[in-house]
Image: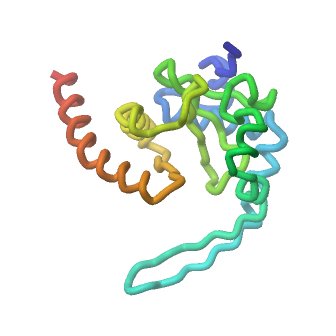
Amino acid sequence: MVNKSLSETELLKFGTIGNLSQKAEALLNEQKSNWELLQANFIGLRKVRTKLFTLDNFNVKVQFNPTRITSTAAKVDAKSIAERKCFLCLENLPAPQKGILYKNDYIILCNPFPIFEQHLTIPNINHIPQNIEKHFLDMLDLTFDLKDNFLCFITVQSVELLHRIIFIFKLELKIWFQLKAITKT
């Protein structure tokens, strides 16, 4: 397996590393310093234009981010996906891209096409479908571990999947809190 993880010694040069949230911030600092594409696209966030809409007492903020065009315009049909290397697999990551190993199954990476000032991507280190259902408790743990400085969310490709995730969230969140209570005693 390709080693793309930064050590704590390497991370310490870029910030405090007392918890995972701080390590992730140090990772962002390291990657912005050492990866030109990431640095350029984070600078590109300055060009983002936003507009706020109010709909029935509900605010919606829309973002136009021209540096995301490479990512958002990518072909996602089955043939195009089959013809390109998986950009989440460790062996296919750009040379300067590094991350933080999480639970020995995931790697926390900086997203090279960010929509936020702190934008991470957390794929499984194995080439498997990125299916939230089988990894939901790990993602809840990750959300808890990053809570000091990050907001975690998931993107989905279909409404059907979104409904499934919402259902699983309601069910598994209760289980997760019960498991956390048991492990603390």
Position of residue 30 measured from the top left corner of the image (x, y, whole percent): 71, 33
Compared with residue 126, is residue 24 higher up or lower down, i.e. above or below? below
What residue is rendered at 77% in x and 44% in y? 38
Residue drawn at (64%, 28%) of the image: 99
Instruction: Compare residues 124 and 4 and report the one nearer the observer.
Output: 124
* Left or right: residue 85 compared with residue 6: right
Residue lying farthest to the front in this orientation? 79
Q: Quadrant of the N terminus?
A: top right
Answer left or right for 34 relative to 133: right
Colour scheme shown:
rainbow
- State which quarter of the image contains the C terminus: top left
Q: Tag count in the figure?
A: 0
Q: Residue furthest top?
A: 1
Q: Quadrant of residue 97?
A: top right
Name the spot of residue 151 as percent of width and height, x first.
Answer: 47, 49
Q: Residue at the spot x=70%, y=34% of the render? A: 86
Identify the residue at the far right of this view. Answer: 36
- The residue nearer to you, when weighing 146 against 89, is 89
> In the rendered image of this protein, does residue 62 appear above or below residue 85?
below
Residue 142, quarter of the rendered image: top left
> Residue 35: image x %, image y %?
80, 36
Give 166 or 47, whichever is nearer the viewer. Answer: 166
Q: Nearer the viewer, residue 156 or 141?
A: 156
Q: Name the residue located 51 percent from the left edge and 22 percent from the top edge.
A: 105
In the image, residue 170 above or below residue 58: above
Residue 148 x, y percent position in the rendering: 43, 42
